[in-house]
Amino acid sequence: MIPALMPTYNRADLAFERGEGARLWTVDGRRFLDFGAGIATSSIGHGNPHLTKAIAEQAGRVMHVSNLYRIPEAERLAARHVANSFADSVFFGNSGAEANEGMIKAVRKYHAETGHPERYEIICFEGAFHGRTLATLAATGNEKYLAGFGPPVEGFQHVPFDNMNALRSAISGKTAGIMIEPVQGEGGVRPCSDRFLQEIRAVCDEYGLLMALDEVQSGMGRTGKLWAHQWAGIEPDVMSAAKGIAGGFPLGAVLAKEKVAQFLKPGTHGSTYGGNPLACAAGNAVLDVILAPGFLDGVQRVSAHLWRGLEGLVAKHPSVVEAVRGRGLLCGLKLKPEVSNGDMQGAAVAEGLLTVAAGMNVLRLAPPLVITEAEADEAVELLDRACRRMTPSAAKVAAK
């Protein structure tokens, strides 16, 4: 018999009842160090006092009114994001997939309104993950995710990641934009080089294309800057954001330059829940924390400390771990082919550490941005124990 909660996920047999910072406790009293953060979403930790107070106070006033009316909390949050990014205007939705849908629509609408409706195709990259809606599945291009849902939405091409020759060869008179994650999360925690982002910016300028960045996972301080593309010193034309933007409360956003945003007029796009008072109160509380003086410097310092520990694991366990990849506090352990990331994730759970599996046999680490160096050291120690569980010799002994 099918369960009441539709079985669309392979859930671990863990149920959490409370959290504090980077810690979670299960209903049966077990404690875990959380280096998954709800898939890079609990950006300022569990039970953050400032965030929970903001949500509680806003809930006591008004949670939802719809976008039929002005929403002061959304106006303030949009103004703060504009002040701290390339963007001139922001649209709020509910999720990363919805943000990417909005971004795709914005790219197509721009060309339709500027006299080139034939330009509707978007070049994406192999290994991408942009969401589970029909359009974002097509943008993702993963056959496993597309199977069974009918013909894919038209208008997306895929080229090898970080390959400029292939990218240039794919551009045609139908091309509207180039859509890329600065760090592929689901696709194996693969960062594209700063140079590649710079070259994409130059190609977009050369051909009159829009540069569309998916910063759903890499944004909101995850790499040590507010937005990952800032490391490359470039600006996109439009960008999606979600996950850490409200610290765990559902919120997504499309940030755009005026030349793009001006065409999203009343009736062209919308969302019932998007940008409601409660979500934007959470978003403002998260910005209070992340934009505080020294916070992002701290993320850079702690992430560098964590990386040193992870690189030590590569040297210590060469039969288990091949390399460390990613950027900042979005990093992954590339495992040897004979070591399954699912098994490694289970071994980490057995040691009290929560992680997230990713593509290309990578174990993803995306802890709350508020972790300390001591907690980074603890995570490395727990991973060391998990690696010992996964070494071929240890596996043989266990089998006997």
Image (cartoon, rainbow, N blue to C red):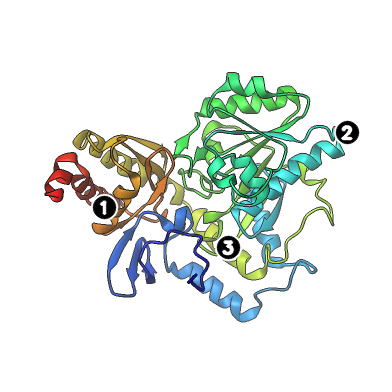
Within-10-Å neighbours for mark 2: few <14, some 14–19, many 20+? few
| Badge 3 or badge 1: first in the primary sequence | 3
Name the residue type under label 3: Pro
Q: Residue at x 73, y 73 (%)?
A: 65
Q: Label 2 belongs to which residue?
A: 115
Could you tell me how many numbered marks the image carries?
3
From where the camera sits, is residue 167 visible? yes
Within-10-Å neighbours for mark 3: few <14, some 14–19, many 20+? many
Q: Position of residue 108 (x, y in %)?
A: 77, 40
Within-10-Å neighbours for mark 1: few <14, some 14–19, many 20+? many
Q: Label 1 belongs to which residue?
A: 347
Q: Position of residue 314 (x, y in %)?
A: 25, 35
263 and 130: which is toward the camera? 130
Q: Residue furthest front?
A: 1
Report helix, strand or loop for mark 2: loop
Compute the Cα span from label 3 to label 1: 30 Å
Task: Judge depth for marks 2 and 1 and give the one in front.
Answer: 1
Task: Judge depth for marks 3 and 1 and give the one in front.
Answer: 1
Name the residue type under label 1: Ala
| Badge 2 or badge 1: first in the primary sequence | 2
Report helix, strand or loop for mark 3: loop
Q: Give the numbered dot on residue 250.
A: 3
Q: Position of residue 121 (x, y in %)?
A: 73, 34
